[in-house]
Amino acid sequence: MNIVQEIPSDQAEIIIIGSGIAAAAAANSILVETRRVNNLRRVLVIESREMCGGGTGRGNGLLNCAPHEMFHRLRSTIGLHRAAALVRFQLAHIKVLRELCQEIDRGDGYTEFREKEMVELYLTERDCKIAFAKARLFAQWIPEFKIATFGADQARERFNVSQAVEGALSYDSATISPFHFVNSIWNTLLLKYKPFLYIMTHTNVVAIDSVKGDPCKCESLIVSAHSTKDDGYVVRTTRGNFRCNHIVHATNAFAPDLVPGLRSKMTGILGTMTAMRPGFGLFNLGKRYAWSVVHGKTCDNAMQRPANQRSPGHIITSGGFSRAAGHGTSMIGV
Ligand SMILES: Cc1cc2nc3c(=O)[nH]c(=O)nc-3n(C[C@H](O)[C@H](O)[C@H](O)COP(=O)(O)OP(=O)(O)OC[C@H]3O[C@@H](n4cnc5c(N)ncnc54)[C@H](O)[C@@H]3O)c2cc1C
């Protein structure tokens, strides 16, 4: 989706940089909340590519967080109780997204939300044992969410997978088309908040200065100035300059380009995704399952988009990180 809108002036109250899922969530919250208090603010969204052309448009759309793995990772940093609370919060996303997609879809399945059984396949006995131990601890702390475990023979039979598989575990999950979902949110917001939301695609933000002319020393992803006149920001773009009082950086791995405070703290990792059109022998194979093949600390994921009369449903795979040169180091900072 490319959007060319006439921007009524070079002033907006709030500028959001980026148009992926983080930007859509920020715009939605700002517009809903400011309308609730009868004080709607003018929001300008600036995106360097087409609408939703970043990670969101290329994501697989698996809605699981590998809950046993996440719990294990978090418990060592924030403790068992808080880890359990945070994982419960993440698991609740599926319910919220189901309801939101039903509202957006109005029966036509546009967002491609589908409940699935997520199957994690393990290729070594060691990886399998480690995962089962994590699943056992998870069951003690979050017993209401069921994770089933399968030994090698059971896994091969139940999921019809090769002899290379040494075990599996599975749990309830869901998939979505993030591109369709997020673009629907933008469409809805544009219709609902017409004179208050402007979007410019194919416009790169190249620098941010203070109104007084100094380069902005941003330290965080949300910055605010206090007074409208002398204290705002000038956002310099490839289509001219725009003034505003608040900036939300929703630029994902590009954040350090515009937020100097993050430069030594984060960098991007290149993620790749492939969409393959299979033969009709694989018609809607992914209606019930989504898959993840786990190798040590990384994994490759696969899911299938819904089939229709013309297509058996594209198979979407992503990953390959640990197989890249230098066990993935060639994918960092590119
Ligand atoms: C291959 C792949 C598969 C994935 N699979 C999954 C999955 O199955 N499940 C899951 O939950 N997550 C998955 N993810 C991760 C998920 O897609 C991202 O975490 C999420 O979409 C990030 O959203 P975002 O809004 O933060 O960033 P993005 O969607 O990347 O949006 C950032 C936007 O900012 C724009 N931008 C950057 N710099 C500028 C600038 N200077 N001026 C203007 N615009 C700018 C970019 O063009 C981009 O559109 C996957 C990611 C990839 C790459």
Image (cartoon, rainbow, N blue to C red):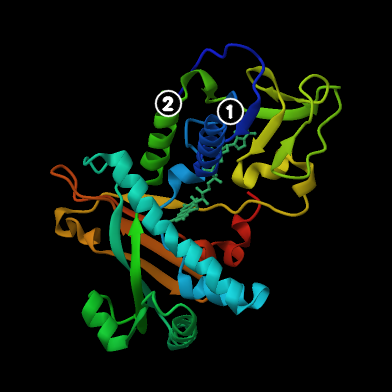
Q: Amino acid at mark 1?
A: Ile
| Residue 81 point in image, percent of width and height | 59, 76
Is ligand 1 within 8 Å of the beta carbon of the residue shown at mark 2? no
| Residue closest to the eye, 255 or 189 | 189
The residue depicted at 45 percent of the width and 69 percent of the height is 66
Q: Secondary structure at mark 2?
A: helix
Residue 129 appears in the rendering: yes
The quadrant holding residue 221 is top right
Q: Position of residue 153 (x, y in %)?
A: 27, 88
Q: Can the viewer see residue 61 in this picture?
A: no
Please indicate whether residue 98 sits to the left or right of residue 298 in the image. left
Q: Is disc 2 surrounded by few (<14), some (14 to 19) or many (20+) residues within 10 Å? A: few
Residue at the spot x=50%, y=18% of the render? 195
Question: In the picture, which quadrant includes the N terminus?
Answer: top left
Front one among 325 and 38: 38
Decide: is 246 above or below 234. Answer: below
Say left or right for 4 vs 115: right
Residue at the spot 19% in from the left edge and 50% down from the top edge: 312
Q: Residue furthest front?
A: 37
Q: Nearer the viewer, mark 2 or mark 1?
A: 2
Horizontal side of 155 relative to 317 (left or right) equals left
Label 2, label 1: how far apart the Cα atoms are: 19 Å
Q: Quadrant of residue 78?
A: bottom right
Q: Earlier in the sequence, mark 2 or mark 1?
A: 1
Disc 2 target residue: 192
Which residue carries the number 1 mark? 46
Residue 232 in picture, x, y percent from top left: 77, 25
Mark 1, ligand 1, within 8 Å: the answer is: yes
